[in-house]
Image (spheres, helix red, strand yellow):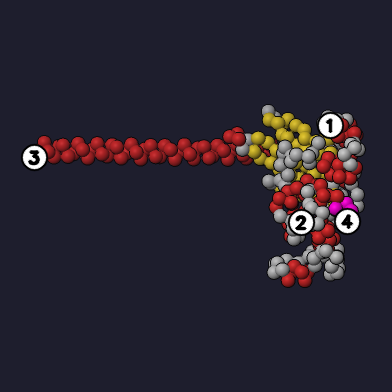
Amino acid sequence: MKSRQQGMALIIVLWLIVLLSVMAAGHARNVHTDVTLASRQVEIAKARGLAEAGINHVILEMLADESTLEIPIDGTVFPVGVYDDVVTLAVRNATGLVDLNSAGAELLDDMLRACGVEDADRPALIDSILDWRDRDDLTHLNGIEDKDYFAAGLPWSSRDDAFKTIDELKYLPGVDQGLFERMAPLVTVYSGRSGIDIENAPPILVRMLAGEEIVPATQQGDADSARRRGRQNGTFHIYASVAAGGGTMAAVEAVVTTSRSASQPVRIREWREPPRQVLPPLEGFSR
């Protein structure tokens, strides 16, 4: 009887050892997972900080009267070293983009054509943009005004004022996420120009405006006219990305206005994460 009890006790002890081993293994896995996740978050935070540092570095160089950095302002992708890491950047002068508040119907048509919008669909989109930004409630021939939004059961109406951000394009009928992503690198709300500066424009838009035979010097590899060293005044769209450990990536987009004003030499118009445009950029949208 005593030996039987000892045998049962031994079995119970063995089972307890197995159970404790399983629990220890599970705890070790959980600790490993937590450490991995924490390490990943640290890498992402570091990459985000580097991307922001890259943008701030470019802004400071643009404010300097004498800069050591030659900055392309036509969307050309270029690297900037921050400590022991490399930040991938692209800067485009807003004058090279189509201003949603100032561009006429012809330029809007060229922009939509560059985005692959079919001939039959462009008039409605153009008039919808014009109706969104004008202050009256009169509907353009193919457009849409307040009553039309309400009739369609939409919970918003036309702004009847200037676009505050290009994201408002998503409110227009016919603009899905795919089309918006193609339009975003081509448009702005900050240039105030009815036309665009070809030297700083995305190449896909240049081809629509100038034709395949006419290629600006900056597209032929001679980008000197689009590169600036030292003080720059104007509004610029800036994109930055950094590859983080584990194959992750952090990216930031900013729109800034720089001036010679002593009280406000730089004004942050937008600061977005993630950006609307990724780096490397979509094929054809950057030099």
Depth check: give the residue in front, 62 or 185: 185
| Residue at image point 62% right, 40% down | 45
As measured in the structure, the alpha-carbon distance from the residue carrying label 4 to the one carrying label 3 is 100 Å
As measured in the structure, the alpha-carbon distance from the residue carrying label 3 to the one carrying label 2 is 86 Å
Where residue 88 is drawn, which disc sits there? none
| Callout count | 4
Report the magenta stretch's main SS: helix
Circle 2 residue: 169
| Residue at image point 90% right, 42% down | 210
Give, as a three-letter code, the residue at label 3.
Met
Q: Earlier in the sequence, mark 4 or mark 1?
A: 1
Q: Position of residue 63 (x, y in %)?
A: 84, 39
Give, as a three-letter code, the residue at label 2.
Leu
Viewer-nearest of labels 3 and 2?
2
Circle 3 residue: 1
As measured in the structure, the alpha-carbon distance from the residue carrying label 3 to the one carrying label 1 is 92 Å
Q: Earlier in the sequence, mark 1 or mark 2?
A: 1
As measured in the structure, the alpha-carbon distance from the residue carrying label 4 to the one carrying label 1 is 36 Å
Quarter in which the C terminus is drawn: top right
Q: Earlier in the sequence, mark 3 or mark 1?
A: 3
Circle 4 residue: 105
In the image, the segment drawn in magenta is 102-109
